[in-house]
Image: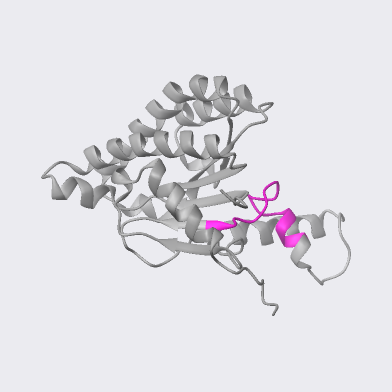
Amino acid sequence: MKEMPKHIAVIMDGNGRWAKQRKKMRAAGHRQGVEALREVLEKADELGIRHLTVYAFSTENWARPKAEIKALMLLLLEYIKGESKALHKKNVRITTIGDLTSFDDKIQKEIAKAKALTKENTGLNFNIALNYGARDEIKRAVSSIIDDERAGKREGLAVSEEEIEKHLDTRNLPDPDLLIRTSGEMRLSNYLLWQLAYTELVFTETLWPDFTGKDLEEAIKEYQNRDRRFGKI
């Protein structure tokens, strides 16, 4: 395959519809979605992708029914505890974006352990968006710049794009080259709004639990056939 995207962002959509089609509880769709994530991670690592960012839980997801949120939290805890050692053995680094303080202490501790365990790894960077919303991220970045102003760490009122980027959750990552959204929906849903300015977007009708490594390859092939001009001729 020719030039590969360095950073792929994914909106993993369609778990609930997958479960509904099979007359199952929504939690079953989320659990099957984890299986799809395992396969996509393996394929991304195999292809040499440097960064994979997945939209796991948004700031808006707290508005879902309490029972579903509880199931998602249990699944998140189970995933982090069960997968971190396996990913570590594969030289995968685990990072997160979003405000983790809204999660209970047990989840926060497991995430911190997974990040600490894998922080020196040099393979695929698996970046999980948790309690993440792009508007919230930008708001927090602006607040951080204001705090720097009050602390005397910066001078003047003008703010550059570079300064904003240094205060975003993704400050240590390149902007995504490719965004994939599953389930046929064609919107960004408050995801990486700053970072996706010149990202190539690929939408697929496939529901996330049915998304495979082969589907990832197809999305990358579509990306490779795009002419990226970044506003230039």
Residue at coordinates 34% horizontally, 64% vertically from top-left? 185
On-image quarter of the C terminus: bottom right
Q: How far across and how far down the image is residue 148, in percent? A: 79, 55
Residue at coordinates 45% horizontally, 64% vertically from top-left? 188
Q: How far across and how far down the image is residue 69, in percent? A: 31, 42
Residue 13 drawn above or below residue 28: below
Residue 51 visible: yes
Seen as rendered, the residue at the extreme bottom is: 233
- Report the span colored magenta: 163-178
Q: How far across and how far down the image is residue 232, in percent? A: 70, 77
Residue at coordinates 44% horizontally, 33% vertically from top-left? 104
Q: Between 38 and 29, which is closer to the camera in this rendering?
A: 38
Magenta stretch, main secondary structure, is loop
Q: Is residue 132 shown left or right of residue 78?
A: right
22 is within the stretch colored magenta: no
Residue 13 drawn above or below residue 90: below
Residue 9 drawn above or below residue 85: below
Q: Between 231 and 104, which is closer to the camera in this rendering?
A: 231
